[in-house]
Image: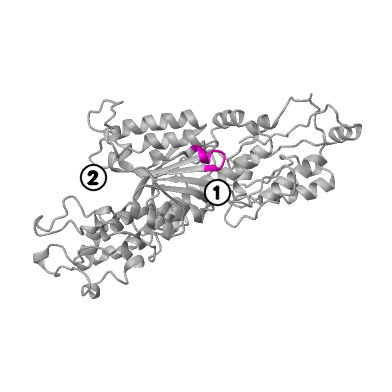
Amino acid sequence: MTALPVVQPVAQGFSQRREKRLRRLGLPIEPKGHRNAVTVAEDVVAVPADGRLHDNHPGTPEAQPERRDVATHCLPDRELPPKVRDHSRRVTIQPHPGAPIDMAHVLGNARRIASAQADYVDGIYLGEVVRSVHRGQRTASPRRAGRPSFAVNPELVELFAGTGGAALGLHRAGWGHLACVEREPAAAATLRAAGIPAVEADARDVDFAAFRGRAALLWASPPCQPGSTAGQRHGAADDRDGWPVTLAAIDACRPTWFLAENVLGWSYHLDLCGGGHAACPACHLEGVTAELARRFPFTGQWRLDAADFGVPQRRRRLILWAGPLPLDPDGPAASHAHPEAAAAQGLRPWLTMGEAIGDTLHRGTCDRRACYPCDEEHGRACSEPWRLDRPAPTVTTAEEKGTRANAVADWSFNGGPDRASDAAFLVAGIRRIDLGEGLRLQGLPPDWPLQGTVSQRYTQVGNAVPPALAEAAGRLVLAAHRAWTALQAAGVDGAELAQALRRRRVAVPGRVAA
């Protein structure tokens, strides 16, 4: 990667003293308006899509980490006055790309250094600003003109909020909620009982224009049935299709960012669909993605497994994102991995079903729930206790029915085992997991205030977004949003910045919010 260029000052209107300072530093004087913040952004946005800061990445054996000054743009120390050198040492990037930098320090001291070098301002790197946003970041002081203030968390609107799993995760990520729209009365009652601002209504009947200018993010978890095997995968031909109302909500409230969560079935084409078929989920999703691209500078998709973020179940989901800055194509950085690979990757091993519910998933609880005998007449009941040492299969809305294994099916799993209750049967002969176990496998608090009938509660648990999954996506978008706020405060033109980012093929790295 080439050295980062110097941000040149404008000469018109400068005092003679400042002009002499420019010449002493060896900086050419250019006409006013020759370089602006966008030109600077094109030259210095410096986080490649692969997440590497520079060619000799610290992870490679031949790495030779280099120092890079945020505000002095690689000018050697000997070329700077002593006062400037002292300031620049306090705002350098550490050799490891994951090292956090305080944004207030960057935005404040970088401007002072720029002033000491004759007022070249707006020398803000996308990479440095984004990396400076990390867990526990202090709020930037609002007293200085030109600095963004994050004293108030940015806010969002959520569609198809369900039981509040996504809301809890986004809250943990640092987002505030304006409203969570949910039409099912029992789920809306759960949201209210949990203290979440619920709007009990069909999303098609909500005037989202009321949130224009207030919602920085719109999150949606549209019904999965049009894209799932259980729902027959009828795509746009299904009356339950929630993508049209989601796009309408985007048009009405015009959020800065968009996130949506759904099943992977939306990304698979029907056999012989031929492309462009309304009843094909993947064809329909391609149309939705195209519509997002018309509304946002950057869009993308992530395929994420909740187990990689500390959820004790395998739950693979499709996440759509859109916004003014490009995000890591691989999504937020994982915190967990398969036990055999975790140590090599510097991650924690997956949480297991035993760690989550091992205290209740045993034969000692059969006095309060249905269990099958552990014998050959009942197939594989109790035959695989080792399943406690791995994440559970996906928690589904069918957990109320229990395991697929039964006498009618000759104790087979009809394509499974693929639901959490199947694993409970294999571990201890238990017919179905209970609601508390389902909550813990989803990563929700076991005392989450579920409302409604038993059937409605099981549906809420099965449909829930694991909070840890929503939190990981929300943290990455929040980090990018704060960087975007900082760039706007610096006067960067969004459209021209987007063009520069596309030319440089850079993205906000997924590990920035880890």
The spot of residue 274 in percent (x, y) is 26, 25
Using a 10 Å C-alpha cutoff, classify the residue at mark 2 as few (fewer than 14 neighbours), some (14 to 19) or many (20 or more).
few
The spot of residue 202 in percent (x, y) is 37, 43
In this rendering, would 224 be left or right of 4?
left
Kind of residue indicated by mark 1: Val
Q: Is residue 74 above or below residue 350?
A: above
Residue placed most toward the observer, 2 or 188: 188
Residue 173 among magenta residues: no
The residue identified by callout 2 is 230
Residue 215 among magenta residues: yes
Q: Which structural element holds mark 2?
A: loop
**Magenta highlight range:** 209-216
Kind of residue indicated by mark 2: Ala
**Residue 418 in view, yes or no:** yes
In this rendering, would 20 be left or right of 93?
right
Residue placed most toward the observer, 429 or 17: 429
Q: Is residue 30 above or below residue 336?
A: above
Using a 10 Å C-alpha cutoff, classify the residue at mark 1 as few (fewer than 14 neighbours), some (14 to 19) or many (20 or more).
many
Residue placed most toward the observer, 455 or 51: 455
**Which of the two labelled residues, at mark 1 and mark 2, occupies the earlier sequence position?**
2
Residue name at image x 10 percent, y 66 percent? 376
* Disc 1/disc 2 C-alpha distance (Å): 37 Å
Q: Quadrant of the N terminus?
A: top right
Residue name at image x 18 percent, y 68 percent? 371
In this rendering, would 450 be left or right of 489?
left
Residue name at image x 39 percent, y 38 percent? 204
Q: Is residue 353 above or below residue 266?
A: below
Quarter residue 115 falls in: top right
The residue identified by callout 1 is 512
Q: Comparing marks 1 and 2, which lies closer to the viewer? A: 2
In this rendering, would 489 be left or right of 345?
right
Q: Which structural element holds mark 1?
A: helix
